[in-house]
Amino acid sequence: MMLPEIHEFLGCRTPDGWIAAALADQETLLIDHKNCEFKAASTALSLIAKYHGHVDLINMMSRLAREELVHHEQVMRLMKRRKVELRQLSAGRYASGLRKVVRNHEPVKLVDTLVVGAFIEARSCERFEALVPHLDEELGKFYFGLLKSEARHFQGYLKLAYQYGDAKDIAQVIERVRAAEQDLIESPDIEFRRRLSSLHLLACRCRDAPTCRLGRARKAR
């Protein structure tokens, strides 16, 4: 399954080194994935609470929160079948790095947050796609099934950004976030993190979203 819209949106592909490391430690991969799904749902609910006058945002985030909690439960069941025990994972730098480019005044703070959310969802989707061919049948089928929902979340975040912001400003925000996100993906990280999603999401979606320190990214074809 090719995702040209996702690949065009992101500034780079996930490095081969990240994929190899994630495949080599699938227990951490699953624990991290579980955490990110839960944080994605939590962030959606936080956005509803903060922007309680934005009806379309509330409707989308309500649906997203329910879906992410279902994914969280699905990962938990996978972990149980594979006898993967829960353990604490330390925070990564990806989401905090993206938060640095979010402006701190409204209404542009919301717009920037939504654009960051779109990037984290896009990265999550791109990494699922990269992992699927290398996974066993059960896990590969599960991750393949998540591709559509992750792509839909990416599109939803971007649609809301354009609804609540100015198109010209959003184009500049996308370029700014793309550069920051690419730097985080390609530059060295002291602690290698096997992060899938991003969003998942910034403080918005996931404080512990994808980071990587190995190799340089494959350039989008």
Image (spheres, helix red, strand yellow):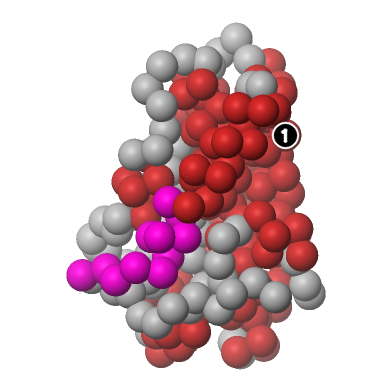
Tell me the magenta residue range. Answer: 180-190
Say which residue appears at 37% left-offset and 55% top-offset: 94
Type of the residue with mark 1: Lys
What residue sits right under mark 1 in the picture? 159
Q: Is residue 159 magenta?
A: no
Residue 159 appears in view: yes
Where residue 55 sits: x, y (%)?
68, 16
Q: Measuring 40% from the left and 82% from the top, which residue is drawn there?
A: 215
Image quarter of residue 3: bottom right
**Relative depth, front residue between 1 and 43:** 1
Q: Badge 1: few (under 14), some or many (20 or more) residues near its Cα, within 10 Å?
A: some
**Residue farthest to the top, as pictured:** 53
Tell me where residue 44 appears, x and y as whole percent: 53, 34
Counting labels gives 1
Image quadrant where one finds the N terminus: bottom right
Q: Quadrant of residue 30?
A: bottom left
Q: Secondary structure at mark 1?
A: helix
For the point 51% across and 32% down, the residue is 112
